[in-house]
Every structure is written in structure tokens, then in C-alpha cells.
């Protein structure tokens, strides 16, 4: 496997090698069907097992019971930005959004097309370098729901603890830190995540809904956006992205085999520490974008003293087998995305490379 690089891309992103190998071994003849998983009917027993197991494993990893449903939908997290207000923002009601980056802004923008909204808190001042404190969050009188983004992929910030707001349904976009740490999922009325960071390839979006939310869905919106229909049909209302769901299923199995969310969080903390320690040891050379108490364990964002050095860093890192480190244009600089599947050795290699780069250019 020496020709595989350490892939620090923000998404699509690195997947566990074991999962890729399992998919490769099964690709031509899935479980004796004589067909690839990409060729079999989504109504077949073989696919139904994948679909059912993936729902059960997601619930098991999150400790969720029968009062929750897990759906595998299409259109990316971006489609959820619109589906959420369509389903849960009735006329005359107000939906609250906590803005912590570009993805929460995009979620808000879609809701604004469909109903009344309220910005309950924003950290746009200072270019989204932190998560708001509890006391900064000012809800509207009776929000239809409160929406937050658990991890801000572009800015490299992450909620360290999740708030609760009494009866107001809490909805979270967890696209870039889903299943990376244990948390109390029962606090949430809905959780959603595009798969292409921590869960699998692009093409499928994981949507977790509390049963009472499903019962609220209106009947007068397009069928493909109706959560109640997708729940009733077990995510098989139309042809699902079978290969992507199958890959998510393998990733879920891998997560369970590797100790679940507690073990994942320990690994992720140790991995992120390797990189943040190098940043903190040379504050004149590396400057982290996120405030320390808002730092993401998934996306580490930092700058160097000049854009020329940043370009040189990316070029030399790429040549050294460390790929995808260029930062997003809104923050500039560098971003190391170190999702669940990034091995510790990848973070160690990056930390060593950073130290050496600083020694030569600092
Ligand atoms: N939310 C977050 C936090 C993201 O990082 C992304 C993608 N980078 C999205 C939403 C959009 O996801 P998709 O491309 O699946 O629509």
C-alpha cells in the first residue's frame, strides 16, 4: 500500500483502508449473488440486509431506541437545508439558527426562502473563529426548531458541548464530525450528515429523526422531500444510492469493531493533539485560526507567516505524500482534515513535516 498517500482532504475524504479492501474483495460478486452491489436490485434481500443493518448499527453506536428513525437520503446535506424548513417550519412560526460558519449561513439562507427565521447567535465577527457561549444565544419566543452546525469544516471549530433549549426541537448538521465522539443523541430531534467525510463516499446523506418529528411532516410538499414517506418506505421510496449506503454500512461495522465512539474520540483527541501541539509550540510561525476552546478535532486550520510560504508548504507536503492540505479560501492558509479514518501515523507524519518545515523556513 506504499502508493497510498495520507489524504487530508476535507471531503470526499479518507476512508478506512480495511473498508476499501473489503469493498474491493466483494465488488465483483457480492456475497455469492454473482453480481456487484452496484448491479443488484434495491428490492433484493441482499440490499435490504445492508439497509437494515446500517440503520441498526447507526442506532447502536448512538445509543438510540425505537423512538428514532435512521434514513439514507440523497441530495447531500445541502438538500436537507431546504427539507428541514419545508417539513418543520409552519407558516407563521419562526426557526432559529445559530451561525458558526458558511454551512450554517447556507442552511439559514434556504430557510429564509421558506419562512420566518431568527439568528439566535452568530460568531461571524472575527471570521468564525469560535463557537458562541451559552449566554450569547438568544432564542426567539417559541422557535419551531433551533438549528446548529456541530463542526465547522471550513473554519476548524467544533461545539465542545451541545446546548439544550427546553422543548424547542434541536436540529444539527453533523456532516463533518458525525460519529467521531460520544454525545447524547437523545438531545436532538434531528441530526443529519453528508456521508463523504466520516461515513463513506458522497451520494448518501444520513438523516436521524425522532419519531414525533416524522409525525409533524406536512403532506403538501414534494414527495422526495417528505421525511414521513422516506421513513414509511425504509429509505426505499425510490432507488437508493446503493453503493454509497453499502460503504456506510462497512464503515459502521468498522467503527463497532474498533471500539465505537468512545475509542474513536480517544484516537481523534490524540491525533489532533499531535498537530495542535506543533502549532502551539511555534506561535510566531504557525497561527491557528480557531480559538483554543473552540478547536475542532476534525479540521485543523492554520496559517503561516506569508502566502508564499503557504504555497511552498502545500507543494512540499504533497511531494512528501501528505495531500489535500490547502485551506478553504474563506480562511486561507492550510487545513488538515483528520477524520476518523485518518490513522495516527498520518497525523504524526504531518506533525513531523510541520516541525521540519518550520526549522528550515522559520
Ligand atoms: N454541512 C457541512 C458542515 C459541510 O462541511 C458540508 C460539505 N462540506 C455541507 C454541509 C454540504 O454538504 P453536501 O455537499 O453533502 O451538500
Image (cartoon, helix red, strand yellow):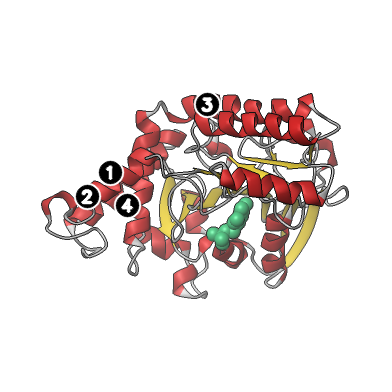
- Foreground tag (4 vs 1): 1
Residue 169 location, x and y as percent?
62, 48
| Residue 326 pos. (x, y %) | 67, 51
**In the rendered image of this protein, does residue 258 appear above or below residue 57?**
above
Label 1 sits on residue = 22
Figure quadrant of residue 238: bottom left
Mark number, residue 53: none
Which numbered tag is attached to residue 267?
Answer: 3
Front residue (pair 325, 290): 325
* Residue lying at 70% horizontally and 69% vertically, measured from the top left: 115
- Packing grade of label 1 (10 A; few <14, some 14-19, many >=20) is few
Who comes first in sequence, dot 3 or dot 4?
4
Q: Residue at x 77, y 24 (%)?
A: 281
Which mark is first along the chain, 1 or 4? 1
Callout 1 secondary element: helix
At x 74%, y 66%, the residue is 116
Residue 239 shows in the view: yes
Looking at the image, do the residues carrying marks 2 and 3 touch, with CB atoms under 8 Å apart? no
Q: Quadrant of ligand 1?
A: bottom right
**Distance between the Cα atoms at labels 2 and 1?**
6 Å
Secondary structure of the residue carrying tag 2 is helix
- The answer to which of 154 and 294 lies nearer the viewer is 154
Q: CA distance from mark 2 to mark 3?
A: 29 Å
In this view, the residue in front, 321 or 283, is: 321
| Quadrant showing the C terminus | top right
Name the side, left or right, on which 37 lies relative to 211: left
- Mark 2 in CB contact with mark 1 (< 8 angstroms): yes
Q: Secondary structure at mark 4?
A: helix
Q: Which residue is identified by label 2?
A: 26
Amino acid at each position: 500500500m506504499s502508493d497510498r498517500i495520507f489524504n487530508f482532504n476535507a471531503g470526499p475524504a479518507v476512508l478506512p483502508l480495511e473498508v476499501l479492501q473489503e469493498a474491493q474483495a466483494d465488488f465483483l460478486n457480492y456475497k455469492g449473488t454473482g453480481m456487484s452491489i452496484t448491479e443488484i436490485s434495491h428490492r433484493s434481500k441482499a440490499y435490504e440486509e445492508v439497509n437494515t443493518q446500517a440503520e441498526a448499527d447507526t442506532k447502536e453506536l448512538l445509543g438510540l431506541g425505537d423512538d428514532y428513525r435512521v434514513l439514507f437520503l440523497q441530495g447531500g446535506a445541502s438538500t436537507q437545508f431546504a427539507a428541514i424548513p419545508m417539513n418543520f417550519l409552519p407558516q407563521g412560526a419562526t426557526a432559529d439558527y445559530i451561525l458558526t460558519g458558511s454551512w450554517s449561513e447556507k442552511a439559514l439562507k434556504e430557510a429564509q426562502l421558506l419562512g420566518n427565521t431568527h439568528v439566535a447567535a452568530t460568531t461571524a465577527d472575527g471570521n468564525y473563529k469560535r463557537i458562541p457561549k451559552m449566554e450569547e444565544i438568544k432564542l426567539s419566543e417559541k422557535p419551531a426548531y433551533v438549528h446548529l452546525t456541530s463542526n465547522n469544516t471550513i473554519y476548524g471549530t467544533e461545539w465542545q458541548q451541545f446546548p439544550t433549549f427546553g422543548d424547542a426541537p434541536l436540529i444539527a448538521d453533523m456532516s463533518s464530525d458525525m460519529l467521531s465522539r460520544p454525545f447524547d443523541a437523545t438531545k436532538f430531534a434531528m441530526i443529519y450528515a453528508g456521508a463523504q467525510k466520516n461515513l463513506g463516499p458522497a451520494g448518501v446523506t444520513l438523516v436521524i429523526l425522532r419519531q414525533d418529528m416524522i409525525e409533524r411532516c406536512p403532506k403538501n410538499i414534494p414527495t422526495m422531500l417528505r421525511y414521513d414517506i422516506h421513513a414509511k418506505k425504509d429509505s426505499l421510496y425510490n432507488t437508493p444510492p446503493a453503493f454509497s449506503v453499502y460503504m456506510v454500512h462497512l464503515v459502521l461495522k468498522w467503527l463497532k469493531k474498533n471500539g465505537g465512539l468512545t475509542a474513536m474520540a480517544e484516537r481523534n483527541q490524540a491525533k489532533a493533539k499531535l498537530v495542535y501541539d506543533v502549532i502551539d509550540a511555534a506561535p510566531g510561525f504557525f497561527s491557528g485560526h480557531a480559538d483554543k476552546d473552540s478547536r475542532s478535532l476534525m479540521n485543523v486550520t492554520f496559517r503561516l507567516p506569508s502566502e508564499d510560504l503557504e504555497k511552498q508548504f502545500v507543494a512540499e507536503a504533497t511531494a512528501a505524500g501528505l495531500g489535500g492540505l490547502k485551506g478553504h479560501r474563506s480562511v486561507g492558509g492550510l487545513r488538515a482534515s483528520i477524520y476518523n479514518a485518518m490513522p495516527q501515523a498520518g497525523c504524526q507524519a504531518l506533525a513531523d513535516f510541520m516541525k521540519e518545515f518550520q526549522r528550515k523556513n522559520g
